[in-house]
Image (cartoon, coloured by chain):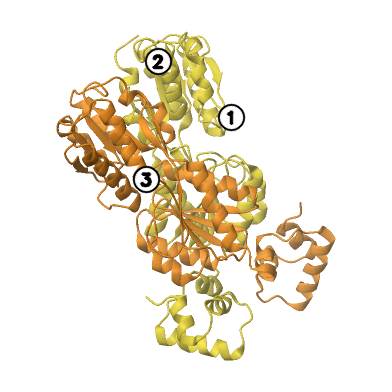
Chain colours: A orange, B yellow
């Protein structure tokens, strides 16, 4: 396949000149003619730049995530990429790291680079996306705008965990969350709490742990956590830290306390003891979000609607036996 | 801060027109004048697009990684972002997933979007980068071009692991690698093998495991792995699968076999048993690569040189006691 470099060489001009030509910048009439001839001779397939100029489509979509080190988001990225790639789109990944300012810069950059649309899972900058006018789909965390939203059924997930722990004989329960409560965390907590009340248990205890360092602070909480028979952590990373904390304080999982996570990241089944968790349909979430974004890019007006995907409980060693 | 939307509103034109204006596309003289006035009135700070036109710098760098689900690369991404952000640059992350074709598309897109430079850790597409002429630094895996290369001292890492296992009483050793041997893997293996020979041991056994599914195939190898007292996996993910495989086949780590990984990804110290591993200075690698890229972007010609950063052994539970 001919490249821009080949075109430059054949036309006897610099790559920068060819780049300017395709970007609509100034190119002398002589150079323009030479480039035209080279493009034809080499059957140079219009790439990103050429496509951008001809139909304003770059075949690039941006995926903005709140963290790349929580493995849920890399796995989501792979799902989005799988579907996007099948449809001829590239995905560039932007790590907002919880910063609204960083995310706004990414939105500016993606818009300026003619990205065709953005999938975001931060739950932030809703208004900024809306004003920018670029097609948007939110996934996992809700934006609070009219953008279509793809999420797993977090509320039911919370209820299922409660039912499972109670079935296993746990009567005093605790929930672990992060300080900034996203819509996902909120729904998981509400499902868990509502179900506990419905079953006649007292309200579960609430642990709030800093998520910026992957919940390392939880490691000090083994003693306090050991007061609870059933512990539901809002994500798998927090669950793993809770297990380590209990273990460190001399309390065995699942014999003393049972622990359930949420997400089913890859490490959940690799961990010892392997982690019972609520599996999100990560691939299906990525696929659905990409599909909804491409429909918007193709000009379809989508309703402001939430696509709720069902979750399933993965029972593993951290809830084995009974307390 | 005024946005493109504010400019469009004040000028009474569409956001698309403002976007065209900043991208050098066709805008009617009347619209151009209205936009000029609005930009001045709002003290609109030239963003990505404007910067791109005025000084050909987008303040965006691309980071191309071979996998986002191996936690080493998200951690490297965070290191690059930390340094880039401090220097006023944004980072977009491109996941090549081992595909040369995908990586070439990313190179095209990044060049076309006026990214100022690329940091790549795939070890692929060296010639394609070179022909593209965009500033490049390779990190971890070597490109084989004149681009500056930042890597940790993989060879010494392999030697240190061998010394450690032998000190712990292991005499028959094995190495686990992936089928496509990157320069990093090669140097780790060579250091390990050379040191074993230097110490008068026989050549370590070689296990090759598919890395595309995070080494799941290793899970079947517990019985074969148990023949070795000291096992060195070329990365932490493979080490964790080896521990699980041994455990599953009824062999305890470290009592029956000792296991050492490489990378020191976050999960290494969270795992049970916690994983002895060679810590790469991930933050320093990201920082150095970014620094070298920005120096090239600023016009400096850099020597084709390898920056070798030293590694350190983290002794944890998987090599506790002695065999």
Towards the viewer: B82 or B43: B43
> Is B213 rendered above or below residue B88?
above
Tell me the crowding category of disc 1: few under 14, some 14 to 19, or many 20 or more residues within 10 angstroms, Cα based.
few
Residue on which the image places disc 1: B181
Residue on which the image places disc 3: A154
Q: Is residue B137 left or right of residue A248?
A: right
Q: Is residue A89 left or right of residue B149?
A: right
Where does the image place residue A51, in percent across and percent down from the top left? 68, 64
Where does the image place residue B267, in percent across and percent down from the top left? 36, 33
Name which residue lies at 57% across and 79% down. Answer: B17
The first of marks 2 and 1 along the sequence is 1
Towards the viewer: A263 or B167: A263
Where does the image place residue A1, in percent across and percent down from the top left? 76, 51
Residue B33 visible in the shown view? yes
Tell me the crowding category of disc 3: few under 14, some 14 to 19, or many 20 or more residues within 10 angstroms, Cα based.
many
Residue B315 visible in the shown view? no
Tell me the crowding category of disc 2: few under 14, some 14 to 19, or many 20 or more residues within 10 angstroms, Cα based.
some
Tag 2 near tag 1, CB within 8 Å: no
Where does the image place residue B91, in percent across and percent down from the top left? 47, 56
Name which residue lies at 53% across and 43% down. Answer: B121
Q: The residue marked by circle 1 belongs to what chain?
A: B
Return the residue found at the far right: A41
- Quadrant, the C terminus of chain A: top left
Q: Element type at marker 1? A: loop
Tag shown at residue B247: 2
């Amino acid at each position: 396949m001919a490249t821009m470099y080949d075109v430059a060489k054949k036309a006897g001009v610099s790559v920068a000149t060819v780049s300017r030509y395709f970007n609509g910048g100034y190119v002398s009439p002589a150079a323009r003619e030479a480039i035209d001839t080279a493009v034809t001779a080499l059957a140079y397939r219009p790439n990103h730049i050429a496509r951008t100029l001809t139909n304003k489509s770059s075949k690039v979509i941006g995926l903005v995530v709140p963290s790349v080190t929580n493995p849920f988001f890399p796995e989501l990225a792979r799902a989005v990429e799988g579907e996007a790639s099948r449809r001829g789109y590239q995905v560039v990944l932007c790590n907002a790291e919880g910063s609204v300012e960083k995310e706004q810069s990414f939105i500016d950059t993606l818009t300026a680079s003619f990205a065709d649309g953005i999938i975001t899972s931060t739950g932030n900058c809703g208004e900024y996306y809306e004003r920018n006018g670029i097609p948007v789909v939110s996934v996992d965390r809700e934006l609070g705008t009219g953008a279509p939203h793809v999420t797993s059924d977090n509320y039911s997930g919370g209820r299922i965990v409660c039912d499972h722990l109670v079935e296993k004989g746990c009567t005093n329960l605790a929930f672990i969350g992060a300080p900034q409560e996203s819509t996902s965390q909120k729904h998981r907590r509400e499902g868990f709490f509502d179900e506990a009340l419905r079953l006649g248990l007292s309200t579960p205890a609430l642990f709030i742990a800093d998520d910026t360092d992957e919940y390392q602070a939880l490691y000090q909480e083994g003693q306090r956590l050991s007061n609870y028979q059933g512990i539901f952590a809002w994500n798998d990373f927090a669950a793993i830290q809770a297990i380590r904390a209990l273990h460190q304080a001399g309390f065995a999982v699942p014999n003393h306390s049972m622990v359930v996570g949420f997400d089913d990241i890859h490490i959940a089944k690799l961990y010892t003891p392997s982690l019972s968790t609520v599996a999100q349909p990560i691939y299906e979430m990525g696929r659905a979000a990409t599909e909804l974004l491409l429909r918007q890019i193709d000009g379809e007006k989508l309703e402001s609607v939430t696509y709720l995907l069902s979750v399933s409980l993965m029972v593993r060693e951290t809830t084995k036996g009974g307390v």
